[in-house]
Each structure stands twice: as C-alpha cells, then as structure tokens.
Image (cartoon, rainbow, N blue to C red):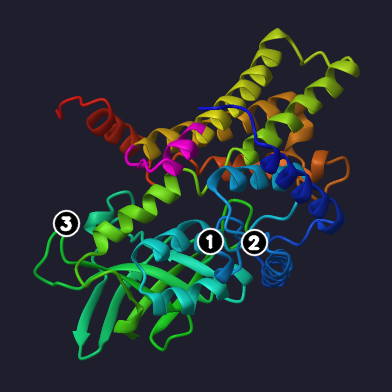
Amino acid sequence: MDLRFTAEQDAFRREARSWLAQNVPARPLPPMDTPDGFERHREWEGVLHEARWSVVSWPEAYGGRDVGLVEWLIFEEEYYRSGAPGRVNTNGISLLGPTLFAFGTPEQQDRFLPRMASGEEIWAQGWSEPDAGSDLAAISTRGVRDGEWFVLDGQKTWCSRGAWADWLFCIVRTDPTSERHTGLSYLLVPADSPGIERRPVGRLDGEPAFADVFFDCCRVHESNLLGGEGDGWSVAMATTSSERGLNLRAPGRFLAAADRLAGLCRESMAAGDERVDAGLVDEVVAALIGARAYRWQTYRTAARLEAGGLLGSASSMMKVFWSELDLELHATALRLLGSRGELVADAPGAVDGGSWLSGYLFALAGPIYAGTNEIQRNIIAERVLGLPRR
C-alpha cells in the first residue's frame, strides 16, 4: 500500500482538526453511564451530526460525508487527539450500522440509520446470556412466531448501554427445534416495549454501563427482523467482524493514549522520579511502537477492503492485538504513576482526572468482550493459520 496521504486526505484532516478545536467541550462531560451524562453525550452526538462528523464514511443521505475508510481513520485520529467526548452510540454506529447497510431492507435503512447518526436513538447490544457468554451459538432466548409478531421470552446480560438505550439489537432462537448456529434470528427491539425489564449492572467504578434485560412475552413486529428468519447467525457474524476489527477500536484511540503516556514519562523523568528506570522506559516505547504498528496494520486492512477484499477471520487478530495493547498501555501508566495512579477523578492530586485508573479498569474487560481472546486465538489457529483442531 502507499503510505502517503493524498492532498485531499490531508485537507480532510485539517478540516476535522479545525472543527474539533473549535467545538470540543471545554470541560469533560459527565460520565455517559449516568442519566445526566447519557443525555449530555446524546446532545454531543447531535452536534457532530449537524456538522456531518458523526458518521463520515456513511452516504450523505444518512448524514455522512460519503468518504472512504481511510478518511474515517483519519477523523478518528483527530477525534481522539482532540480529547473529544466518548461516543455513546458506538453500538449503533460502529456495530449495527454496517450490518444494516449489508442486510437491512431500504425501509429499515431509512427508518433507523438517520436517527442512529443523529443520536436521536441510542442502541444497546443484547447478545450474551447467563449461560451463553463467549458461546454465542448456545443462546436460549426464544422468539416464537405469532402471526406477524415474534413473542420474546428469556434473558440477556452484559448489555452494553442497556440501562438507558432506546433500542436493542438481539439474537433469539426462533426455531425451538434448532441447535447451535441454526434457527437463530436477528431482531431490532424497542427498549420501551411492554414485557421488557431492565436491571442496571454496575462496573468496577460503580457506573451502570451494562444491564440485564428480561423478556416476558415481549412482542416484536416482523418488520424489525434483520435478514431472513433463521439467518441470524450469518447476520451476527457480520456484526462481530465490525466488533473485532476496524469499526469498534480505531487506532486513533491508542495513538492518543500512547502519546499521553510518553508525555507522562517525560514529565516524570524531568522531575527526577526514581521509578522511571530503563525497564519502564522500554514499556513506554513498546506502547508507542504497538500503537503505531496497529495504526499501519489497520490502514493496510482498510486499503484491502476498499479494493474489494474481505476482513474475515483477520478481525480476530486485530481484536487480540488491540485489547492486549490497551491493557498493557494502561498498566504501564499506573506503574509510572505509582500511588498517584490510584486516585479517582475527584481526588486532590489526581493525574489526568483519574483517567489512567478508569482506563485500566475498562481495559481489563478488553480480552473478554467482543469474544474472549482465547476464542479468538482458536479462530486464528484454525481459520488463518490452518492448524488442525485437537
């Protein structure tokens, strides 16, 4: 691939950087997993959408700029570089959005994509179940046909954004005689439907970033079926490619964090901090190298996709890499900070608003969500390296 950006791409970067410099809130928004913070982040999505920065790679008809994947990666680099707020509708824009483009009917695309882009409707992911976490094919939530309706009964757990979201995208078993990957269907469910109960689940920091969702005779119209009835596994696999590959974790996230880490290291060295020995400096350098390696690997993948290639099982390699990079990067920062790294956001003397500690706690989940890294390594071994199953 050509590692040089075009003049048009450089101009796109300058435009994005200028807009973000003028519009990113001067003060951090409240945490998005609180009622007030959720709505404040929804408002920010509207600001992005108004300037057509919310979904830059989408067609203009759905609020985008109709640019390519490379431009989207450029925007993500500038977005994280600017310190802009987290995106509360990542589940919709990054995961469900590409799936709707691939499998949705024109009516479904027109109904859901504009409201998704603007933040009017925020989405939660309803996949995992108490007895089916990494083993998605083992789900048991039922969707029984009743004329033009599906009647849902069962439970979903670890639903990201599930406490406050407006909609959920769910996989349910619509053929009661089916097993494993067959007989599953992909449904789009209004979160305020009768028969739904949501129970917030707190993270380590106490914020309800997840929810248990219970379905009790919840009726969902067939117009909200994404893909064909019984084709849920194929549709879901398209979503997982987005979840593990380019869409969920663009390299800009890690480039910005690695640069912040390097700055922290330089400050500590200038202050004569004795903890900053050669080993710790090597860890910082490894984080910088890892972030840049992931950047160029992602650009290479984007170039291949724009040329008509497929992501496929390579998404598993990307997921293992970014999740472990994120964890090690934040662990290095905490080792660098020592006892100061234990201070929470509102504590006197907290460094960077306690973001290194909260980032580390979040990164601990990285090797688990989007499919555990153990499962991803099995996929890499079998489908990328061609090794035999044992």
Q: Position of residue 298 (x, y in %)?
A: 51, 35
Question: What kind of residue is marked 3?
Answer: Arg
Is 83 placed above or below 321 here?
A: below
Residue displayed at 29% across by 83% down:
222
Question: What kind of residue is marked 2?
Answer: Ser
Write down the region rendered in magenta.
Answer: 300-313
Q: Residues within 10 Å of mark 1 (few under 14, many from 20)?
A: many
Provide the residue designation for mark 1: 93
Q: Position of residue 67 (x, y in %)?
A: 58, 53
Question: What label sits on residue 375 in the rendered view?
Answer: none
Q: Position of residue 61 (x, y in %)?
A: 56, 71
Residue 368 appearing in the image: no
Left or right of 79, for residue 304: left
**Sequence order check: which comes first, mark 2 or mark 1?**
2
Left or right of 66, for residue 131: left
Question: What label sits on residue 180 in the rendered view?
Answer: 3
Separation of disc 1 and disc 3 at Cα?
Answer: 28 Å
Is 138 placed above or below 252 here?
A: below
Quadrant in which the C terminus is drawn: top left
Q: Could you tell me which secondary element the residue under label 3 belongs to?
A: loop
Near-viewer residue (75 or 366): 75
Q: Residues within 10 Å of mark 3 (few under 14, many from 20)?
A: some
**Sequence order check: which comes first, mark 1 or mark 3?**
1
